[in-house]
Image: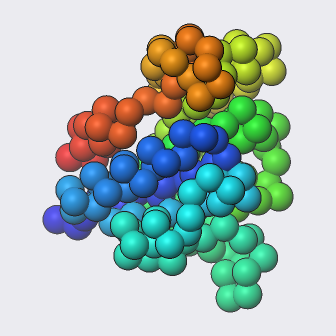
């Protein structure tokens, strides 16, 4: 039996550090990982960390020489596509179908052939904003699995919903889904 293949996409959120913990758990569990960082994700988490955990170069540039069709081959390769964390910017970009970055291209190239999970992480007010709430509802209606957020103290100091689901919980969900 082949190892489960997870395409871990990290966007710009203070919670991006949790992606390293999730990548470590998945790798220890025998998953093959390919990590993708958005421009914002690179501001919060270094490529070297994810490369060390996944054993693969981290991807981020849709125009990188020699990788023009990477978004197609990565979707074919993956068993599960996961945006963890999914910031408000990327949630609304996915809803709009924007494909000017690698994460947007992967989303459109997948066209729901493979499971596509989104783990929101943002301030409570951002999560409740009509643009984000509607985007999440539409993405779910299209076939995305929207993972719940936790409640507690947020990076901004507020207390409420919007905390990224803990890596251990997401790891358990991935194990359940991929066997």
Relative to 159, 95 lies left or right: right
Is residue 143 shown to the viewer in this render?
no
Relative to 112, 176 lies left or right: left
Above or below 168: residue 3: below
Please provide percent x and percent y for residue 11.
64, 48
Instruction: Quadrant for residue 101, please give it.
Output: bottom right
Q: Residue at x 51, y 77 (%)?
A: 57
Total marks shown come to: 0
Relative to 52, 178 lies left or right: left
Q: Nearer the viewer, residue 70 or 141?
A: 70
Which color mode does the image show? rainbow
Instruction: Quadrant for residue 65, please give it.
Output: bottom right
Extreme residue toward the bottom, this view: 66
Extreme residue toward the left, this view: 1
Please provide percent x and percent y for residue 150.
46, 19
The N terminus: image quadrant: bottom left
Q: Residue at x 67, y 46 (%)?
A: 12
Please provide percent x and percent y for residue 75.
54, 61
Q: Residue at x 43, y 29 (%)?
A: 165
Q: Residue at x 20, y 46 (%)?
A: 179
Above or below 115: residue 164: above
Relative to 62, 59 lies left or right: left
Is residue 119 shown to the viewer in this render?
yes
Extreme residue toward the front, this view: 157
Please provide percent x and percent y for residue 145.
50, 31
């Amino acid at each position: 039996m082949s190892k489960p293949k997870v395409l871990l996409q990290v966007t710009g959120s203070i919670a991006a550090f949790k992606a390293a913990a999730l990548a470590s758990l998945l790798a220890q569990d025998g998953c093959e990982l390919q990590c993708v960082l958005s421009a914002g994700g690179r501001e919060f988490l270094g490529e070297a960390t994810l490369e060390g955990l996944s054993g693969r170069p981290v991807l981020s540039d849709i125009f990188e020489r020699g990788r023009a069709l990477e978004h197609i081959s990565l979707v074919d390769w993956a068993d599960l596509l996961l945006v963890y964390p999914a910031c408000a910017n990327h949630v609304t970009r996915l809803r709009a179908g924007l494909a000017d970055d690698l994460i947007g291209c992967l989303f459109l190239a997948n066209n729901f052939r493979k499971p596509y999970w989104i783990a929101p992480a943002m301030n409570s007010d951002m999560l409740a904003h009509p643009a984000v709430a509607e985007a999440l509802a539409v993405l779910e209606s299209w076939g995305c699995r929207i993972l719940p957020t936790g409640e507690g103290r947020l990076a901004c100091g507020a207390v409420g919903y919007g905390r990224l689901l803990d890596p251990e919980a997401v790891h358990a969900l991935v194990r359940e889904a991929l066997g």
